[in-house]
Amino acid sequence: MPIDMRQKLSSRRLAVINGLLALWMTCLANTSFLHHLYTLTPYNGLKAGVFLVSAFILLWAYLNLLLQLITWGFLARPLQSLLLFLCAFGAYSVDTFGVGIDVGQIQNLMQTDSHEAKDLLSWQLLAYIIVIMILPMFWLWRKPLESQGFFTKLKERIYSVVLSIALIGIVAMLFYVDYAAIFREHRTVRFTVNPTNSINAFTNYFQRHVTIQKLPLVRYGEDAKRHQIPQGKPTLMVLVVGETARAESFSLNGYTRNTNPELSQKPLINFSQASSCGTATAVSLPCMFSGFTRKNYDDELANHREGLLDVLQRAGYHVTWIDNNSGCKGACDRVTNIPLLPHRTTTWCIDGECQDDLLLETFNDYVKNAPVADRVIVLHHAGSHGPAYYRRYPKAFEKFTPVCNTNAIQGCSQQALINTYDNTILYTDYIVAQTIDTLIKDAKDYQTALWYVSDHGESTGERGLYLHGTPYMFAPSQQTHIPMFAWFSPNFAFTHAQAQQCLKQKQSVPVAHDNLFHTMLGLLGVSTSVYERDLDLSWCE
Ligand SMILES: [Zn+2]
């Protein structure tokens, strides 16, 4: 390399550093994006190669432009470091899970507790952080930036910006139609461009949440009353909110593996065509309790409006939430919350993550000691939450082998991953069946019923996707098709004979989280002006 060139490259001038960082980000943090674009072109051979080069140039020019425009003065290096940080985490997420970064992902991240976050840590993530973030940061901070006069700096900056714009223009002239078609048809591609995907997602998230926090609570269903009090004993309805359980892995829905050996022995009303409101807990959970349908779901309003549990409480039910997950995302803010039994954590918890047996024990203990009254108890499962599926169940439920004993799931075979996931479903089968057994015993004091519904599904490598959180429009059925079923004790079934008939008619028609709010009001005999009969699955002519 000529000395002059070498001097230029080792220069500590900000405009040059920005150009080199853009190159680093293009080469290392965006391989999935470039590969994705490459697979979406209709070309082969040389033309495909030329297109890939154009994509590379376009991306470099775009990132260079971004860096040249936002890095000024003493804030330059902290900002460059922040972008490298976003690149490292973004590239890890996109490369390993095939998950682009959008506002939904950020919402998940913000509502993730420290235990869930720990599950995501792995050696691969460390490698991404070291290579994509730490190495260039070391180089960046090792020596001070060259001091230049203001006008020299500005001149260089302008040259660089003009170069970027010119390159973008040339690529656009040559391949405009291709890029327009790809970005229009595959809208999720932009969620894989690091670090701008994270910047956009964080900006959207904070804009939305700063406004929500200032908003006062909106009352909902203020006129709620129980219109019919069934004869006999008080009602005990248990609503089980499952986690990451997908319908296609339930043998109740036709899966060839027997993942429901216990529930298949119970008289269930199983809805085989249920779909979720979102593809992540942070959307599905508030949505299913909100009274909104998926199509008109308003995240902002749902976050500061009363929901199903407030309405049931107002109508006279004692409402309790027991959580073995990362909280109720606002759905249980004004009802009784019962903590998991502290003296049983050594048996069921590792590093603060507890298996659902602890939830079951807590529930059994609570029901045994709580005064008999009309009750709704929500049990929020840890269920099948990934990527550390193997930590969700006790060893006795490791029926499908070999399993993936790591949270770095991309290193496991797809079959091992599915085995591990199926073991979590087998465990959920046991936990829910045990909950029903408790309710059978409690039938001496109550008329009991149970409703199970999962929050969203999961991808286990189908179409190259893992975990969940894909934007709903593009999400595969693995993430949106959820298990949902009901169980009635004989005395509940007797007092709700008509409702049971109606529910049975809808077992194989498309239903959704949309129906939960109104069906619960219907089954629990609550009338209010916000109830919509057409969405109540327990109502029919
Ligand atoms: Zn979830």
Image (tube, grey):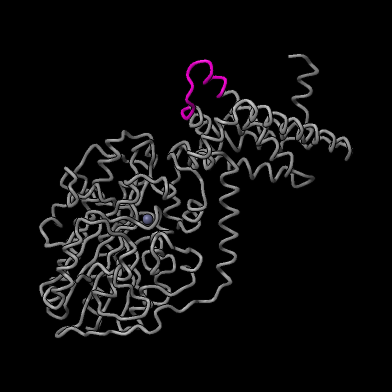
Q: Answer above or below: position of 438 versus 506.
A: below
Q: Quadrant of residue 308?
A: bottom left
Looking at the image, which is closer to me, 84 or 295?
A: 295
- Quarter containing the N terminus: top right
Q: Is residue 50 magenta?
A: yes
Q: Residue at image x 36%, y 64%?
A: 288
Residue 90 visible in the picture: yes
Q: Where 10 sits versus 499, above or below?
A: above
Question: Splitting the image into 4 quarters, where does residue 337 fall?
Answer: bottom left
Q: Quadrant of residue 63?
A: top right
Q: Position of residue 516 (x, y in %)?
A: 31, 66
Left/right placement of residue 455 relative to residue 3 reads: left
- Where does the magenta region start and end? 39-51
Q: Quadrant of ligand 1?
A: bottom left
Position of residue 137 relative to residue 428, above or below, is above
Task: Give the side of residue 496 with respect to residue 162, left or right.
Answer: left
Q: Position of residue 384 (x, y in %)?
A: 31, 51
Q: Is residue 348 visible?
A: no
- Name the residue rendered at 42%, 55% in the picture: 115
Image location (x, y in percent) of residue 366: 26, 75
